[in-house]
Image: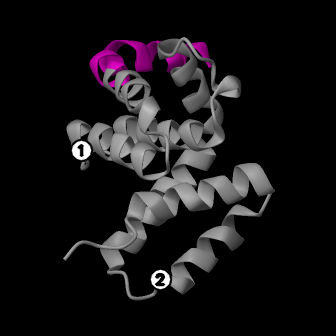
Amino acid sequence: MTKQVTERELVLAILMEVTQQNVYSHLALNAVLEKYQYLEKKERAFITRVTEGTLEHMIELDYILNQFSKVKVNKMKPVIRNILRSAVYQLKYMDSVPDSAVCNEAVKLAVKKGFGTLRGFVNGVAVCCVFHAGVDFKIVEEDL
C-alpha cells in the first residue's frame, strides 16, 4: 500500500500557500502538521526542515536555478518553481537525502501535479544542479 500524500507533496503545498497566497509560513506549516498528526516524527521533521530551509534560502536557490535553467525562475510556472526550489535546497543542504532520490521525487511530483510534459525540464535542471554542485554552489556563495 502506498501513501496517499508524500512529504514532498506537503512541502509543495506549504510553499505554494506561502508564495502564492501570502500565508505566513509558520501558520501554513502548523496547519499541515496538525492535519497530518499521524505522520511519524521523522517525516514531520523532514517537512519542517525542507519547508523552512527552502523559504529561508529562497533568494539563493533562485539564483542557483537561474544559473542552470534557460527559463528564469520568475518565468517558471509556480508549481515547477517551488518543486525545483525544494529540490535544490535538499541537494545543497541535506546530505542525508541521496541526490538521485531528490531528482526522481521532483520529477514524480511534477507529473503528479499535472506537469508531465515538463518532466524532462525538471529532471534536466535538477541533474544539472547535481553535477555542478561542487563547483558552482561555492561560486554562488561568494557572489552573494
The amino acid beneath tag 1 is Ala
Q: Secondary structure at mark 2?
A: loop
Q: Nearer the viewer, residue 124 or 39?
A: 124
Quarter of the figure with residue 93: top left
Kindly report the distance in space between the C-alpha atoms of the residues bearing marks 1 and 2. 23 Å
Quarter of the figure with residue 128: top left
The amino acid beneath tag 2 is Tyr
Kindly check if marks 1 and 2 are in contact, taking CB atoms under 8 A apart as contact. no
Residue drawn at (36%, 40%) of the image: 107
The image shows residue 135, relative to residue 82, as above or below, that is above
Q: Which residue is mark 1?
A: 101
Q: Which residues are magenta?
A: 128-144
Does residue 127 appear left or right of residue 114 in this picture?
A: left
Residue 39's tag is none
How crowded pointer 2 is (Cα within 10 Å; few <14, some 14-19, many 20+) is rated as few
Q: Which residue is mark 2?
A: 36
Q: Nearer the viewer, residue 56 or 128?
A: 128
Q: Is residue 113 magenta-colored?
A: no
